[in-house]
Amino acid sequence: MSATALNLVSDCDLLVVGGGAGGFAAALAGARLGARTVLVEKSPTLGGNAVRCGVNCWEPGAGGTGIPYDLYRRLRARPDAVGIYSFGRHLCWYDPEHEPFRFPGGEQVIDRSLRYLDTLRRFGSRGLPQDERFCRRYWHGVPFEPRAMHDTMRRTLEETGGCRVQTECAFTSVAAAGGIVREVVLDNGERIRAGTVVDATADLHLCAAAGCELTSGQEPRSRYGEPDAPERPSGRINGVSLIYRVAHTGQPGAEPLPASVPARCWWRGAGSAGSGRGGG
């Protein structure tokens, strides 16, 4: 019988809603410490944006040790599942005297001479435009295959013996009192009561449903003392761009641009005319 028919009520020590990188880490840490853990994810796969939205890479210096390094070692055991990159071309390093057009973005190339340790340093530079030599030497990230990441995350959670993973399932409502979530209702009819609830959804949907105070955009510098924050708050958030993957087609050449992509972009110069060179 389905959970809806049974109106099933479950108890656990830790409920994590959202199975992206943060939700996975929270569930894994809790289960490894002995907490009876439930992880709920509305999509079919774990990994969130890193698996489903083309952001399948650790940034240089942000990969960290601990759980990320554990995942990296597990991925290394799978053929072609993970690598370490060095920079190829980058739009910040355009030389108009020697290049016919500005490369539209950043190109990362797998570098088999590097180790995971080489990805942990990025501090000390002024940034990509000002320090090309430093960035080429020290900025290295960790790209991975999305499906391999999902499989590895799921197996790692299963190995704890203390985490139930529920994919293709979302929460529909919460019962909260005094700022504490008492119960979460899922769209399969299950009601979960947990000692601790972690909201790991992309936009803090569970916190919003529970009536928590939320902020979006940039906080003012005075709120948390961040020197790089703006003096005044703003609604500015990270932008998005067209994500694509390059694959062998069996035929040389460039495919035409989708109708939604303009033929001319800000980085396309007069010398870049022609199919496949600098198109938007």
Image (tube, rainbow, N blue to C red):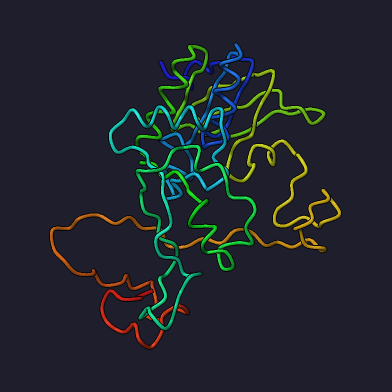
Q: Quadrant of the rendered structure where residue 179 is?
A: top right
In the picture as drawn, the residue positioned furthest to the left comes out as 250
User: From what the image shows, is residue 162 above or below residue 44?
Assistant: above
Quadrant in which the N terminus is drawn: top left
How many numbered marks does the figure carry?
0
Q: Residue at x 56, y 17 (%)?
A: 31
Q: Of residues 271 and 239, which is closer to you in this image?
A: 271
Whole-percent x and y of residue 35? Answer: 61, 14
Whole-percent x and y of residue 79? Answer: 28, 34
Q: Residue at x 42, y 62 (%)?
A: 242
> Position of 13 compared to 119: left or right?
right
Whole-percent x and y of residue 221? Answer: 82, 56
Q: Of residues 137 and 229, which is closer to you in this image?
A: 137
> Position of 34 compared to 217: left or right?
left
Quadrant in which the C terminus is drawn: bottom left
In the picture as drawn, the residue positioned furthest to the bottom comes out as 270
Whole-percent x and y of residue 163? Answer: 51, 17
User: From what the image shows, is residue 212 above or below residue 134?
Assistant: above
Q: Residue at x 57, y 64 (%)?
A: 131
User: From what the image shows, is residue 182 above or below residue 234?
Assistant: above
Q: Residue at x 74, y 29 (%)?
A: 176
Q: Of residues 264 and 86, which is closer to you in this image?
A: 86
